[in-house]
């Protein structure tokens, strides 16, 4: 893995001419040192643009963390650019790529937040900078397998798990394994629902977990199309339980669709995002009889990643910001605002925080199957939904 030289290392060779730096060093590193050095010399804070998208709670999170960070680091100015959920991910990424191709640097997008799909795409296209623990010490607090999954091209700063959400007034002994869940669905027709996987992550997680149920663990970290040949048994299971799910094969739209069924008492168990369940329990939208439990093997979760534009000339300032975001102090704010998992391992958090996730975090897994997720959705439509 290529690791970038630190800014301090660049300063140590200040005796070299600018032309020699350009000829022998990394061009982006030289530009970064120059831009940030100029800001420091002028007494002005180093400023960079951070683009992120999501619901209002994501905006509330960064509106809280940004002043906390700048209070500790007045030499850095983080300019937040919020794009409401569903309106800007692809155009923003396209703008980054277009600027790179046109030789126009970062396109004024220095730090970017998004899902695994854009991590993978950007890694292939050389869009992101590989991150190093030398530059971001708190990177050591992130699960090493998760970082390996993305080859250090991004860092998960928060996450959410898909879990079983169930009505404890109806289900006193919920399934604890995937096999038990399949048996429960068959034995309790109409009492389980999952959403169309193309419309929401909880349904997608359920489908992918079934499809990969009996496959080697390494396959959930592989985007090789050859793995599609191993999917038959999983799709047979999905077809088999189809008549036993809600409405003998009705699949609600979006994550909220199944939560509404659970809320109204029409079903007893669903796969759901843990943060959505926690938030709606806190707001009184779900009855307090609704509980959560992870199963074995666990449903795949959904980290949200921070990615550094490889063309940015503000990398040192960005690394300082990311390091702060991965601190236990900032991660506690992430959990509080997002009702999700911290990006760092729970062992780095307070005991109170660890207790909050008891019974939910066990078995939490991440999948990185690239474009195969889209292929699963296509096959589900033809093999399951259409039956």
Image: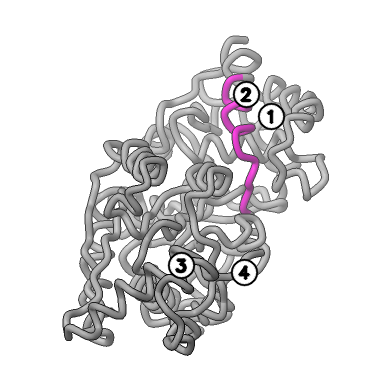
Q: Nearer the viewer, residue 189 or 141?
A: 141
Q: Nearer the viewer, residue 9 or 117?
A: 9
How much space separates mark 1 and mark 4, taking CA atoms?
Answer: 36 Å
Q: Secondary structure at mark 3?
A: helix
Q: Earlier in the sequence, mark 1 or mark 4?
A: 4
Q: Earlier in the sequence, mark 2 or mark 3?
A: 3
Residue 143 shows which numbered tag? 4
Whether pointer 1 and pointer 2 mark residues with C-beta atoms closer than 8 Å, the reply is: yes
Q: Secondary structure at mark 4?
A: loop
Q: Residues within 10 Å of mark 1 (few under 14, many from 20)?
A: some
Q: Bounds of the magenta span?
A: 366-378
Whether pointer 3 and pointer 4 mark residues with C-beta atoms closer than 8 Å, the reply is: no
Q: Earlier in the sequence, mark 1 or mark 2?
A: 1
Which residue corresponds to the image point at 72% horizontal and 49% vertical from the top-left?
Answer: 177
Instruction: Examine the rendering and report whether any part of residue 166 can be seen.
Output: no
How much space separates mark 2 and mark 3, taking CA atoms?
Answer: 65 Å
How much space separates mark 1 and mark 2, taking CA atoms?
Answer: 6 Å
> Percent x, y for residue 230?
81, 30
Q: Nearer the viewer, mark 3 or mark 4?
A: 3
| Residue located beneath label 2 in the image | 244
Q: How many marks?
A: 4
How much space separates mark 4 and mark 2, taking CA atoms?
Answer: 38 Å
Q: Secondary structure at mark 1?
A: helix
Whether pointer 1 and pointer 4 mark residues with C-beta atoms closer than 8 Å, the reply is: no
């Amino acid at each position: 893995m290529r690791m970038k030289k630190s800014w301090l290392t660049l300063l140590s060779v200040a005796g070299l001419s600018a032309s020699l730096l350009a000829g022998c060093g990394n061009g982006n590193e030289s530009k970064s040192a120059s831009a940030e050095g100029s800001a420091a010399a002028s007494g002005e804070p180093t400023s960079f643009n951070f683009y992120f998208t999501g619901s209002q709670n994501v905006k509330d999170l960064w509106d809280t963390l940004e002043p906390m960070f700048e209070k500790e680091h007045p030499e850095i100015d983080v300019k937040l650019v919020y794009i409401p959920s569903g309106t800007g991910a692809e155009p923003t990424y396209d703008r980054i790529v277009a600027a790179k191709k046109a030789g126009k640097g970062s396109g004024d997008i220095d730090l970017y937040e998004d899902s695994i799909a854009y991590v993978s795409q950007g890694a292939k296209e050389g869009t992101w900078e590989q991150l190093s623990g030398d530059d971001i010490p708190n990177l050591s607090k992130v699960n090493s397998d998760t970082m390996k999954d993305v080859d250090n091209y991004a860092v998960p700063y928060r996450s959410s798990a898909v879990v079983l959400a169930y009505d404890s007034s109806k289900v006193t002994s919920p399934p604890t394994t995937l096999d038990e869940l399949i048996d429960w669905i068959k034995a309790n027709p109409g009492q389980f629902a999952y959403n169309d996987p193309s419309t929401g992550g909880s349904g997608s997680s359920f489908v992918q977990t079934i499809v990969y149920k009996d496959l080697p663990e390494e396959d959930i970290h592989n985007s090789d199309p050859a793995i599609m040949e191993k999917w038959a048994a999983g799709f047979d299971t999905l077809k088999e339980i189809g008549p036993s799910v809600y409405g003998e094969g009705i699949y609600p739209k979006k994550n909220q669709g199944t939560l509404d069924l659970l809320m109204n008492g029409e079903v007893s168990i669903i796969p759901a995002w843990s943060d959505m369940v926690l938030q709606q329990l806190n707001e009184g939208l779900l009855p307090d009889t609704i509980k959560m439990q992870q199963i074995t093997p666990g449903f795949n979760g959904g980290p949200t990643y921070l990615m550094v534009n490889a063309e940015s000339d503000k990398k040192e300032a960005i690394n300082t910001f990311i390091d702060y975001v991965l601190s236990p102090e900032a991660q506690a704010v992430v959990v509080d605002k997002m009702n999700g998992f911290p990006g760092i391992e729970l062992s780095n958090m307070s005991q109170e925080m660890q207790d909050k996730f008891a019974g939910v975090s066990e078995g939490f897994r991440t999948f990185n199957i690239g474009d195969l997720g889209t292929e699963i959705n296509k096959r589900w439509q033809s093999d399951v939904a259409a039956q």
